[in-house]
Image: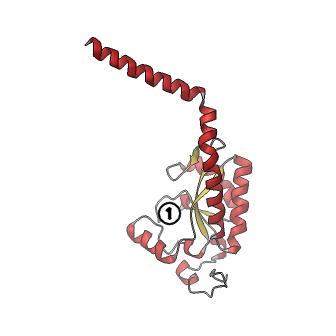
Amino acid sequence: MNEKRQQILIIAGSIITGASLLILFRKQIATFLNFPLKAYFEAKTEEALLELHPKFRNVAKRFLKEVEDKLGYTPIITDAGRTYNEAQANQQSGTGVAMSYHLAPIGLAFDVNFKNEQGIPVLVKASSKTAWQPVVDIAKKYNLEWGGNFTNVAYDPVHFQYSYVVQGRKPSELLKLDRDSNGFIKI
């Protein structure tokens, strides 16, 4: 019994020491962990923006910059430029938006998470409507439709799309339009 108590005390002491060190050096640890990831996520976001339709790309950049400037949230685009076949497969598997609403295959939508200045994710798919509201308010200024307001598909708060240029046409109709030399539909 005495030996078991000693082992428990050693484990408890180790946990307390570890937690104390984490608290004491939290800023240094966050900086160390965030440094390589920050550059990686910024590069991935820039790469994803290039997959968006040219008529939407600058709108998306201005929107994301305003969120970063006003709210201090760094964007991490997690999905953009999905092909029509990929989007259709996602819908059939139950993980994607109905094709009648899907604008990603034509470069008019993206999914994005946001992290704070410490590199901690603050807005993700599991975040509430209330948490997303400041970002949604900015999105409205850019005529972006927010996936958190979709009524006949699943709650998708990370999804933003530029329905403004669609003018009532279904994405499947838009996919039939002529394409420019870079493969983007002419709208």
Visible residue check, residue 113? yes
Q: Nearer the viewer, residue 59 or 154?
A: 59
Give the residue furthest to the top.
2
Would residue 168 appear left or right of 2 to someone viewing this image? right
Residue at 61% x, 73% y is 107
Label 1 crowding class (10 Å Cα cut-off): few <14, some 14-19, many 20+? few
Measuring from the top left, give residue 108's x and y in whole percent: 62, 71
Q: Amino acid at mark 1?
A: Thr
Quarter of the image for the N terminus: give it. Answer: top left
Against 155, is 91 above or below?
Answer: below
Measuring from the top left, give residue 66's x and y in whole percent: 73, 55
Q: What is the tally of numbered marks visible in this picture?
A: 1
Visible residue check, residue 115? no
Against 97, is 176 above or below?
Answer: below
Quarter of the image for the C terminus: give it. Answer: bottom right
Residue at 49% x, 26% y is 18
Measuring from the top left, give residue 160's x and y in whole percent: 60, 63
